[in-house]
């Protein structure tokens, strides 16, 4: 193939990708840049945002105020715990799903995906009805002779609801990875005297790791930026980063501060996710002997 034809094909590829690139820039890159610019604007409670004045005050407040340390720490430990629970629950569930035959596999796959068709807000209200002071769970506890337990507006309620919402995002990537695993490889290892635990560790786990990596990145990122679940089940006292951004924008009307918090959340999320990606990929390549 001549150099001219290669250049022509390359130019055609760039031309065909122009609409997608324009959509990406218009809907993601440009709003992020505008948010970044807004985070450096000066804010005055009397006149509002000063678009022609610039400051680092918002970021200084984020670094020096212990209130924001508490919010970010709570957000990330809850997100990490939700991710861990989704791995513990989702990986075995995906493995069982991959070993099911028809029609049960299709039935259970539909059951796993069905909650995604329901709004997160509706699911949050459903959990509030279950976990409230007069909810079904407390009614059952009282019926058994116990005393009501405070569950709503606690970390327990937020974590439980987030696991319910995020679990499909863990199961599907792991299940997809397991589709590439030949079941005969497990049978061969067992026939050669390997224990089931050793087969899971040396045969299944290396194949599952890419799916687990994808699932953990998705679950952690979505949990850390979640708004509806913490807002409705965490209440005003149990704040997470997304709810603080909401308060800064709509309650305080301090848009630059809200933008600075959002930018900080994005950067910390990227740092955590890239570090985790590098760690897991390194172990995956090591397990393959590369």
Image (spheres, rainbow, N blue to C red):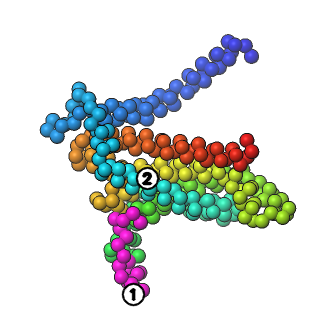
Q: Please tell me how crowded label 2 is: few (under 14), some (14-19), or many (20+) other residues with Cα within 10 Å.
A: many
Q: Please tell me how crowded label 1 is: few (under 14), some (14-19), or many (20+) other residues with Cα within 10 Å.
A: few
Displayed quadrant of residue 182: bottom right
Q: Nearer the viewer, residue 61 or 273?
A: 61
Locate residue 227, reporting x and y percent: 37, 52
Query: Helix or strand or loop: what does disc 1 sit on?
Result: loop
Is residue 73 positioned above or below 29 on the image? below
Locate residue 254, reporting x and y percent: 24, 41
Report the quarter where the C terminus lies. Answer: top right
Q: Residue 153: within the magenta?
A: yes
Displayed quadrant of residue 88: bottom right
242 horizontally vs 213: left or right:
left
Residue at 47 percent of width and 48 percent of height: 221
Residue at 62 percent of width and 50 percent of height: 211
Mark pair 2, 1: CA separation: 37 Å
Residue behind mark 2: 76
N-term-proximal mark, 2 vs 1: 2
14 horizontally vs 181: left or right:
left
Q: Nearer the viewer, residue 77 or 160?
A: 77
Residue behind mark 1: 145
Report the residue that reaches farthest toward the left.
46
Report the quarter where the N terminus lies. Answer: top right
45 horizontally vs 6: left or right:
left
Q: What's the magenta region? A: 138-156
Q: Nearer the viewer, mark 2 or mark 1?
A: 2
Q: Nearer the viewer, residue 9 or 205?
A: 205
């Amino acid at each position: 193939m001549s150099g001219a034809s290669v250049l022509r094909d390359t130019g055609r590829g760039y031309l065909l990708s122009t609409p997608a690139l324009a959509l990406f820039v218009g809907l993601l890159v440009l709003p992020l840049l505008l948010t970044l610019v807004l985070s450096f604007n000066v804010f005055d409670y009397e006149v509002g945002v000063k678009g022609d004045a610039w400051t680092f005050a918002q970021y200084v407040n984020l670094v020096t105020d212990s209130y924001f340390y508490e919010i970010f720490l709570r957000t990330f430990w809850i997100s990490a715990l939700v991710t861990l629970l989704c791995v513990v629950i989702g990986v075995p569930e995906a493995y069982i799903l991959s070993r099911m035959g028809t029609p049960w596999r299709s039935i259970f796959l539909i059951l796993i995906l069905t909650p995604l068709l329901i709004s997160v807000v509706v699911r949050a209200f459903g959990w509030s009805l279950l976990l409230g002071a007069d909810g079904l769970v407390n009614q059952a506890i009282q019926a058994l002779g116990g005393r009501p337990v405070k569950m709503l507006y606690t970390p327990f309620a937020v974590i439980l609801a987030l696991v319910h919402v995020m679990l499909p995002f863990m199961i599907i990537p792991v299940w997809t990875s397991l589709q590439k695993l030949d079941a005969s490889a497990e049978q061969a290892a067992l026939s050669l005297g390997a224990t089931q635990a050793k087969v899971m560790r040396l045969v299944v786990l290396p194949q599952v790791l890419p799916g687990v990596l994808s699932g953990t990145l998705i679950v952690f990122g979505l949990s850390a930026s979640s708004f509806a679940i913490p807002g409705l089940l965490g209440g005003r006292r149990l704040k997470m980063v997304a709810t603080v951004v909401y308060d800064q924008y709509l309650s305080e009307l301090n848009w630059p501060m809200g933008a600075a918090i959002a930018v900080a959340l994005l950067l910390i999320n990227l740092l955590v996710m890239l570090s985790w990606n590098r760690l897991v990929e390194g172990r995956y390549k090591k397990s393959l002997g590369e």
